Amino acid sequence: MNLKEWIFTTDHKRVGVLYLIGSIAAFAVAGIMALLMRAELSTIGPTITANPTQYNVWLYTHGAVMILGFQIPALTGFFANYCIPLMIGAKDVAFPRVNALSVWLFYVGVILALLTFFIPDPPDVMWTGYPPYSTITTGNTAMYSFTVLILGFASIIGGVNFLTTVAYMRAPGITLNKLNIFVWCTLAAFVLQLIFVPVLGTAVSLISMDKYLGTNFFDPTKGGDVLTYQNLFWFYSHPAVYVIFLPFIGVVYEIIAAHAKNMVFNYKMVVYGGVGGIVLLAGEVWVHHLYVSGMADWLRIGQMVTTLMISIPVGLMMIGLIGTLYKGSIAFTTPMLYALGVVFLFLIGGLTGIPLAVPSLTIGVSDTYYVVGHFHYVMAVAGTFAIFGGVYHWFPKMTGKMYNEFWGKLGFWITFVGVNIVFWIMMDVGVKGMPRRYYDYAHFPQFEGAHQWMTVGAAILAVGFTIAILNWILGAINGKPAGDNPWGSPSLEWTTVSPPPHGNWPSPPSVSEDWHPYGFKKG
Amino acid sequence: MAHDAHHAEAHGHAHWDTSIYPFIISFGILALAVAFSFKFVYHNSFAAILSMGIGFPLIIAGIAGWTSEAMGKGEGLSYGAMGWFILAEAMIFVSFFVSYWYTKLHVDVWPPAGNIELPRIMPLVMTFILVASSLTIHYAEHLLHLGNKGGFKTWYLITIVLGACFLGMSVYEWSHLIHQGFTISTNAFSTIFFSVTGLHGSHVVVGLAIFLAGLPSVLRGDVDEGFMRTAGLYWHFVDIIWFFVVSQVYYW
């Protein structure tokens, strides 16, 4: 193997693998932060650190790295890079060098985020960076701003690249109604990135400008307004939920269709109703993060309505998944277990989100563990399960080898149990009044038992994820040969050799009139 | 489908494309981000200069290498991509304008204390120059399309000169205002004024940089028409944004 051809590669598959390695490393670091927090919270009072700021830094790193360093790069970096050109029958992306630039900017962003552990006065502003705290803290807010800016820029140029690729580089015969659901979902996510990431970039630039360059965006004594930041921030960060949701549900569609050997149920409903509906509504719901921040009533009511409305396209996508399972010949392989896990976890997360859309109910549970539990079900864990399932699903394509099915399933079940212990209890203590982000809960001694259960659950899920990652590494080294199309899928990425060579196909593929990515042979 | 036929071919020794420049540019950007922290957070100017001294050459070398490696070898897709990129760029300006409107319409007293009378004539002249440059680049492209390379070169150079004039007038305007005691820290309006005009100015710089990157090939006479169309599109975008900037911060 030629290391130079990997590091300086411009090939979309290798860029994708670089994304995967980086994002899994980020996942491990951010996961360790979560374990440290759980260890700290296992008893009342100081447990493993007596320094609350240390806890704050863990909290910052966990949130920022999980979202910006793991989920978004794994979904819009790894899966998009690896799968989209193969699924549309292209030999590479439109701008291979830009692609390489985006992966290395991603690494630079992650390096910047990890410098947190080595610099004096590390950033301690959560992943949200709200002023006025972020503009007066002694922590290094600039580090936060630049991490977000660099990762944001990486994803913008990635988005431009993929939208151009799918617009101009589809193989002959692949019409818009014959794109994989994953391609549709990821394109929609990139459109959202292009519209909303610049707003986040602006928001985080403004806090560093206020803090270091003497501007007055958020200083009320000079005519500025603090709430501007929260509006700009959530104007991106709510759509960011869909930037993560859309590709991960796309991955789940690919898995469920291939492992149930069934046509996607109501393809056009899923694409135009589900994906299209989410894109249309994504930018009109951000105020539900600001229900208790002093928004006008007309704005809160209006955005309550849009927030409830967005459950319609999301619901259409869930119906599509369930319908695809219906009368399919379901094989309970490891990827399928993860996909079914996503359906289950996402339903719990989705249903617990409905009360949060309604201001009168939210005010009671705002800033409690309920919100944290809901968020982890709906996005953090569901998204992570989809990523793990997706890696298993395309593992034979990437390596040409098969992972170990027994350890795969065992890893899934351990993680699944751990996740439900942690986050179900989290929602429960939240409703009972446990506030989030506390370093110590001496005022709530009644929750100590629940906190210890959550710590146990966190340890269990860490074991499950570790098994999965070890399974990939061992499978890549000495798995059994998998063949080119182990799942028997007609989707285009399975029609080339495993692993695909540079250029993907010896000669450009073309598809017949009656071909469809989900046209499984009935037998 | 059977794929045994191309199996043997695909598993043989394959050449994988590489480019070192994206890697170099990325780490140049890392050095600049670290330099900012050194200067403004840790107040260590020496380390900041050192870090910038690493970062800037890396970025410039990376861009230069990239340009010479890739110029003229594209597949003509950059025009479509630029449209998407402009969408993202426009959203940055939207964020600034919305913050401005939100702040302005939200507070009781506007403008906040410390404002001065902004010049009225200068922005009109600047508008005229920028619009003229947008027309000249359009005309240059038109001539290129007709095959008149000499005419193209002339109008291309005129566009660069007009862009540079605009930039010079911006600098003059800024220094004039700063001398009058109107700086970015004066109040919320001055913050908006300098950041929005500065943001637009930085886009003018980027536009000019794109033109300059294309200049060697223009002087040689082997112009990439796709590159010129893309550069022109960006320049029109910079021009259109200026209408919003000038109307919002000078005349409203």
Image: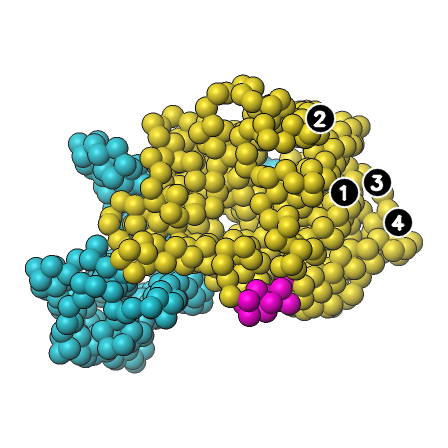
Chain colours: A yellow, B cyan
Could you say whether the residue bearing mark 3 is in a helix, strand or loop?
Answer: loop
Could you tell me if residue A332 is visible in this image? yes
Where is residue A426? Give x, y as percent.
Answer: 68, 37
Whether the magenta-drawn stretch holds residue A304 is answered as yes
State the image coordinates of residue A6 (x, y, percent, origin top left): 48, 35
User: Outermost residue, top direction?
Assistant: A48
Q: Chain of mark 3?
A: A
Q: Chain of mark 2?
A: A
Q: What residue would you read off at disc 4?
A: A329
- Please tell me in which quadrant of the rendered image residue A176 appears: bottom right
The residue depicted at 17 percent of the width and 75 percent of the height is B123
Q: Position of residue A402 (x, y in %)?
A: 73, 33
Q: Residue at x 75, y 50 (%)?
A: A347
Within-10-Å neighbours for mark 4: few <14, some 14–19, many 20+: some
Q: Type of residue at label 4?
A: Ser
As shown in the figure, which amino acid type bears the numbered disc 2? Gly
Residue A339, image x and y in percent? 75, 45
Badge 3 crowding class, 10 Å Cα cut-off, few under 14, some 14 to 19, many 20 or more, is few
The residue type indicated by label 1 comes to Gly
Chain holding disc 1 = A
- Side (left or right) of A468 relative to A322: left
- The range drawn in magenta is A297-307
Whole-number angstrom distance, CA of label 2 to CA of label 3:
36 Å
What label sits on residue A341 in the rendered view? 1
Mark toward the start of the polypeptide (1 vs 4): 4
Label 1, secondary structure: give it. helix
